[in-house]
Image: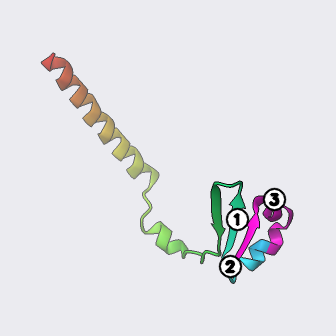
């Protein structure tokens, strides 16, 4: 593990990205913020697509939510 400043990272980004392939790089920003730079394995495209929705499915869901909100706001107004 290597600890560096954010300025050091900025000045030598390639060096620390290469280093992060094998070990964690801790970046200290000021006195209160700390970040860890590490390599993340690439996710398979199929893994992301399995949980994806189509634009049509998204619009249907949004429409259903809007209808629910409209019904609940109307029932509140009728009770008043």
Q: Earlier in the sequence, mark 3 or mark 2?
A: 2
Q: How many residues crowd mark 2 within 10 Å: few (<14), some (14–19), many (20+)?
A: few
- Label 3: which secondary element: helix
Look at the image and say whether residue 11 sits in the magenta stretch: yes
> For residue 27, which numbered disc appears in the image?
1
| Pointer 2 residue | 1
Quarter of the picture holding the N terminus: bottom right
In depth, the one of 54 and 47 nearer the eye is: 47
The residue at the far left in this view is: 79
Q: Is residue 22 left or right of residue 54?
A: right
Residue at (82, 74) in percent of width and height: 15
> For residue 7, which numbered disc appears in the image?
3
Contact (CB < 8 A) between labels 3 and 1?
A: no
Magenta segment boundaries in residue numbering: 1-15
Position of residue 46 measured from the top left corner of the image (x, y, whole percent) = 49, 74
Q: Earlier in the sequence, mark 3 or mark 1?
A: 3
């Amino acid at each position: 593990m290597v600890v560096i400043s954010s300025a050091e990272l900025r000045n030598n980004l390639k060096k620390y990205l290469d280093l992060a392939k094998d070990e964690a790089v801790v970046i200290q920003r000021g006195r209160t913020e700390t970040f860890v730079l590490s390599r993340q394995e690439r996710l398979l495209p199929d893994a992301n697509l399995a949980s994806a929705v189509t634009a049509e499915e998204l619009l249907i869901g949004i429409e259903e939510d809007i209808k629910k909100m409209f019904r609940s706001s109307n029932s509140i107004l009728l009770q008043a």
